[in-house]
Image (cartoon, rainbow, N blue to C red):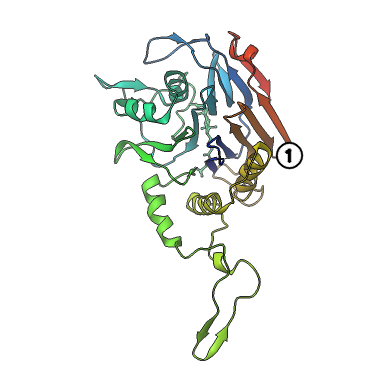
Amino acid sequence: MCTGLRFTDPEGNLYFGRNLDVGIDYGKKLIITPRNYPLPYKFLDDSKTVKATIGMGIVMDDYPLYFDCCNEDGLCIAGLNFPHYAQFSDGPVDGKTNLAPYELMMWVTQEFSSVAEVKQALKNVNLVNKALIDSLPVAPLHWLISDQHEAIVLEQSRQYGLRVFENHLGVLTNSPDFAWQMTNLCNYTGLTPHDAKPQTWTKQNIIPLGVGTGSIGLPGDSVPASRFVKASYLNANYPTVEGETANVAKFFNILKAVAMVKGSVVNVKGKYEYTVYTACYSAKTKTYYYNLYNDFNLHSCQLTDEQINSNKLIVMDA
Ligand SMILES: C[C@H](CCC(=O)NCCS(=O)(=O)O)[C@H]1CC[C@H]2[C@@H]3[C@H](O)C[C@@H]4C[C@H](O)CC[C@]4(C)[C@H]3C[C@H](O)[C@]12C
């Protein structure tokens, strides 16, 4: 399971990140791709990076395979599992901008500075079923893409092809598709942070006892639909707060509420699903914050001018 999240503070600064929930640790690293790094593409001409990018991922064949990342202009993208739905074409399609799914993150962060630009370019994109190396599986993902102004979801499925959704909630989880999650959300319009009202049923007075009666029915289980509703409800109702410390705390507090605790879910491989890390990028200070399942210290890495202008990948143990 995974949950992606974004919101802005009262000044419009973006906070973006995710829970990465899996049964194994992929050996994640904190990776900074500087400007001027030579990037091999499968379907586009090789090029040098132009925007420094920071995020979590692994490096393979000198290629940064990000799980989530943000560029120096504050454009961010996270990949979340989209099993049973994600489908990519067998080969490139003539006349399209063909990309392998693993290339999407670098294409977005290198070519663009805003979601508006990405939306325009996505009109001609086709995702091709190709991994970086043939021995790697192609991850069946969909993506949350955001800047300080807006967020979108990108999905490519057998039934609908490539679709882009406006995402006003700032939340993404897993399957089924985003349109389904939005319809399902309509079942929860009764939820309110305020206490339920007293009622009289067949002459019997019933009064709400204690706090939280307005949100009875807020899901607490781990399926993607439940995490989608819960994270959306919390993101919508969490008060706006001032300053980086309080906004980063807000981010981690919301994601903590949909995090996976070992033992609650055993996946098909017999492994405990757990929140391997939680990350939040602050676009204002260009800082990537994260904590780990067994380490609640708040780690952070701020993009420096030196890193931005280096020409080597900077790979740090997370
Ligand atoms: C498993 C991760 C997503 C976690 C998630 O959404 N879990 C939900 C489970 S469920 O739906 O609810 O069942 C995804 C996110 C990013 C993925 C990785 C990135 O795409 C980078 C490479 C891409 C390669 O093709 C495969 C390995 C890989 C290193 C991917 C492994 C794995 O699929 C990752 C780590």
Figure check: 204 above or below 110: below
Q: Which is more toward the observer, 310 or 193?
A: 193
Q: Is residue 105 left or right of residue 255?
A: left
- Residue 311, image x, y percentages: 58, 8
Figure check: 296 above or below 120: below
- Residue 230, image x, y percentages: 54, 54
Q: Residues within 10 Å of mark 1 (few under 14, many from 20)?
A: few
Residue name at image x 43 percent, y 27 percent: 114
In this view, the residue farthest toward the front is: 11
Residue name at image x 38 percent, y 10 percent: 45
The three-letter amino acid code for the residue at tag 1 is: Asn
Q: Is residue 32 left or right of residue 126?
A: right
In this view, the residue farthest toward the left is: 94
Residue name at image x 33 percent, y 25 percent: 121
Residue name at image x 24 percent, y 19 percent: 95
The answer, for residue 177, to whether it is visible in the render is no
- Residue 112, image x, y percentages: 42, 22
- Residue 126, image x, y percentages: 32, 26
Q: Locate residue 116: give its quadrant.
A: top left
| Secondary structure state at the residue bearing disc 1 | loop
Q: Quadrant of the N terminus?
A: top right
Q: Which is more toward the observer, 309 or 2?
A: 309
Figure check: 128 above or below 84: above
Query: Does the beta carbon at disc 1 come under 8 Å from ligand 1?
Result: no
- Residue tagged by mark 1? 294
The answer, for residue 99, to whether it is visible in the render is yes
